[in-house]
Amino acid sequence: MSWITTKAKKPSFFVSGEIYDQADKNKCYIMSFKAMVGPARQYQLYRTNWLPLISRKNVGSKKKVYAGINANFVIEHDGEIVQWKFYSKYVGDIALQVWREVGIDQYSLVGQNIVETIDNDVQVVNVSSSDRISVEAGQLIGVHYGKNKGGLCYNRCNSNKNPEAYDVSWMEPTIANSSLITPDMVFTFQLSSCKIFSLTAFIKPVE
């Protein structure tokens, strides 16, 4: 049996039996471990994908929304988002979002959690009950980069090697401030490409 030694700023975050990923930002490996302490969770959380939350080469353009019509972005269960996890390369502002289809290549905002990103590390955002986004299967997670864009990162990829990561796009119009994006606005997908974001959401199912 091996042990992982790591610093936990908020030990109460760990839940008994839950699987956690640890990526070393200075080395090329990823580890997963199961918590053996903490309160037992009485419900299962569904994550939108199992992508490694590692540092990647690129960061989205400021004022733009990014989302994807693929397995990495599509929500598969009704419920509410209770947690986001992503890798941030530097400090800045982003909005973690949910979008619903309203027409061909057209989407409107369901809800968002505006976040200040951290420097060069995996970031965990536990969403308070009053700020949780209610979601439905088929909706998309996404991210908006503000004028002072945060460091949530991605890699460009080859759609032949990573077909599951194709159909990622930015949307028009461009908006400087995430708080100005409202559900009555319609955004349009632009040119699709292959991108892998270090981003996932955790969904508590409807009771």
Image: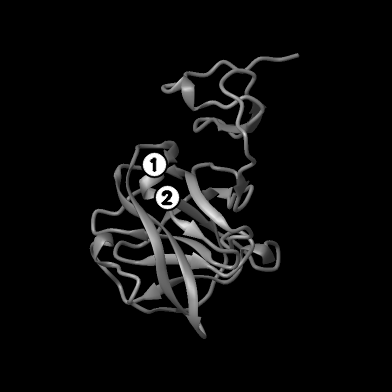
Vertical placement of residue 52 versus 13, above or below: below
Q: Distance between the residues labelled 1 and 2?
A: 6 Å
Task: Report the amino acid beneath label 2.
Answer: Arg
Q: Which mark is residue 128?
A: 1
Residue lying at the far right in this picture: please name it. 1
Q: Residue 110 carries which label?
A: none
How was the colour assigned to the protein in this rendering?
one colour
Residue lying at the far front in this picture: please name it. 207
Q: Which of 175 and 149 is in front in this view?
A: 175
Vertical placement of residue 1 versus 119, above or below: above
Q: Is residue 181 left or right of residue 17?
A: left
Q: Residue at (64%, 62%) from the top-left corner?
A: 71
Vertical placement of residue 69 versus 147, above or below: below
Residue lying at the far bottom in this picture: please name it. 104
On the image, the x and y values in percent for residue 135 come to: 51, 60
On the image, the x and y values in percent for residue 38 come to: 56, 20
Vertical placement of residue 123 versus 130, above or below: above
Q: Which element carries disc 2, helix, strand or loop? A: loop
On the image, the x and y values in percent for residue 164 come to: 67, 63
Task: Report the amino acid beneath label 1.
Answer: Ser
Q: Nearer the viewer, residue 93 or 40?
A: 40
Q: Residue at (62%, 52%) from the top-left corner?
A: 49
Asked if labels 2 and 1 touch by Cβ distance under 8 angstroms, the answer is yes
Q: Which element carries disc 1, helix, strand or loop? A: loop
Return the residue at label 2. Answer: 132
Q: Which of 126 and 55 is in front in this view?
A: 126
